Amino acid sequence: MMYSGRNLMIDYDLHCHSNISDGTLTPSELVDRAAGRGVKVMALTDHDDVDGLDEARAAAARHGMTFINGVEISVSWRSHTLHIVGLGIAPDYPPLVDGLRTVRSGRGERARKMADELAKAGIGGVLQGAYQFAENPNMISRTHFARYLVEAGHCKDVKSVFNRYLVKGKPGYVPHQWAILADAIGWIRGSGGVAVLAHPGRYMVGRNGMGKKTMHELLTEFVELGGQAIEVVTGSHTPEQYAEFARYAEEFNLLTSCGSDFHGPGESYRDMGRLPDFPLGCRPVWQALLLQ
Ligand code: AMP
Ligand code: MN
Ligand code: MN
Ligand code: MN
């Protein structure tokens, strides 16, 4: 299937972050920004935390936008870290609440280890520095480390900090065990949500990335476990990747999702706002969501 986008923009943004996880805007500021940039239907999908949803929903109502409860769950699968977005979840579903608490609970210790490793590499004071950037200390993340290291003058931007210090093989990278795939999908589905494989193109990048065979195995397992959708249009995909993952969606009979994955002004691949339409033949995830 050739990429045959219809040159239309869609006003759904179903993936973004507030300062409840590693975004820089409050949930209300994020929704205001989305509304101002033409978004009509949005989901807030903070990493491993649903605490921003009430505030975001109230802000969306003031703008007359449709709001969808979301979350982005960190998962370890084989040697890879995956992100599974849940859309249309019930944020008070006890297994989801407990599961997310467990996922978050490892972050403090990982942060300490990361700071120790960076100290060995000659960069001190990072733990305290990173926490200054974390509005929600339970959700301390590599992004907060990156922002601090930029402020402290070690790199010119967040992206360079990741490349130099925070990815596999670099001095500040600490392997971590996140949720297992079956649990993440189970919590989402159990709460009435749709499970979406987030930004699949990112899992195939670089030396540690998965090849096509492994992507097929992942999608086979994802579907068997109850996964229903895949992100096709996301801030980190090229138009060629829209086409590539539209083909995977067709092959695995998955709905397709779209979102900016916005984290903050000046820091993300893509701002909140309208997104390029899907390639022809995709079945948008809102066919399932808006029926709920
Ligand atoms: P964590 O959950 O603490 O491992 O942090 C993961 C977050 O770091 C992602 O959600 C992204 O926001 C950010 N991130 C991961 N890799 C990169 C990268 N190469 N460049 C910039 N940000 C990244
Ligand atoms: Mn993030
Ligand atoms: Mn992600
Ligand atoms: Mn994200």
Image (spheres, helix red, strand yellow):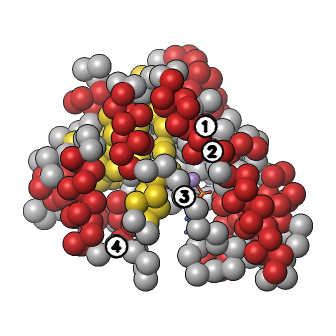
Some atom of ligand 1 lies within 8 Å of the CB belonging to the residue at label 2: no
Give the CA separation, mark 2 to mark 4. 26 Å
CB under 8 Å between discs 4 and 3: no
Looking at numbered disc 2 in the image, what kind of residue is underneath it? Arg
Q: Secondary structure at mark 1?
A: helix
CB under 8 Å between discs 1 and 2: yes
Q: Quadrant of residue 27?
A: top right
Looking at numbered disc 3 in the image, what kind of residue is underneath it? Gln
Q: Is residue 205 above or below residue 142?
A: below
Tell me the number on the disc at residue 256: none
Q: Quadrant of residue 56?
A: top right
Q: Is residue 171 left or right of residue 67?
A: right
Which quadrant is home to the N terminus?
A: bottom left
Give the CA separation, mark 4 to mark 3. 18 Å
Label located before the other in sequence (4 or 3): 3
Callout 4 crowding tier (Cα within 10 Å): few <14, some 14–19, many ≥20: some
Label located before the other in sequence (1 or 3): 1
Q: Quadrant of residue 175?
A: bottom right
Q: Which residue is mark 4?
A: 210
Tell me the number on the disc at residue 101: 1
